[in-house]
Image (cartoon, helix red, strand yellow):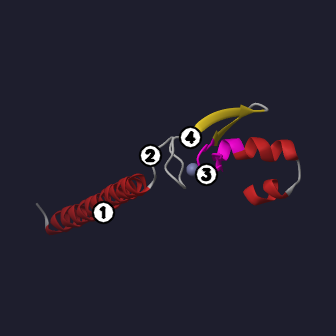
Amino acid sequence: MSKATKQATESLDDVKRVREERYFAREEARLIERLRARREAEERAAHAPPLGLCPRCGTALLVEERDGVAIDSCASCGGIWLDRGELETIAKREGGGWMRRLLG
Ligand SMILES: [Zn+2]
């Protein structure tokens, strides 16, 4: 192998090595991001009240349908709870009122 060929081969190896290092750095960053997202979801789930229970007093919520919108209400404290889809449905019906502005 000539000196020039040897140098060209070595610099090609350097390029491959750098590409591999970048690839693994990106893969590692993706894996870290996935693990962080999973941990955050687990922490949120651990601190959120179980589904179907009033976030204020812990009583089982009743699902009532009012004008085609499902509303979770609490018979104990009188709280009414809406998820985002339900809020958006109400906001659309209301037109340009404050609830529409609240949701942006
Ligand atoms: Zn309640």
Q: How many marks?
A: 4
Q: Residue at x 27, y 58 (%)?
A: 24
Q: From this viewpoint, is residue 104 visible?
A: no
Residue at disc 3, CB closer than 8 Å to ligand 1: yes
Amino acid type, residue under disc 3 in the picture: Cys
Residue at disc 4, CB closer than 8 Å to ligand 1: yes
| Circle 2 residue | 50
| Circle 1 residue | 25
Which residue appears farthest toward the left when viewing the image? 1
Q: Are marks 4 and 3 in contact (CB under 8 Å)?
A: no
Q: CA distance from mark 4 to mark 3?
A: 10 Å
On the image, the x and y values in percent for residue 67 come to 79, 32
Which is nearer the N-term, disc 2 or disc 1?
Answer: 1
- Checking the image for residue 61, the label placed there is 4
Which residue appears farthest toward the right when viewing the image? 96
Amino acid type, residue under disc 1 in the picture: Ala
What's drawn in magenta, residue-wise?
Answer: 73-86
Residue at disc 2, CB closer than 8 Å to ligand 1: no
Which residue appears farthest toward the front when viewing the image? 76
Q: Residue at x 41, y 53 (%)?
A: 41
Which is nearer the N-term, disc 4 or disc 3?
Answer: 4
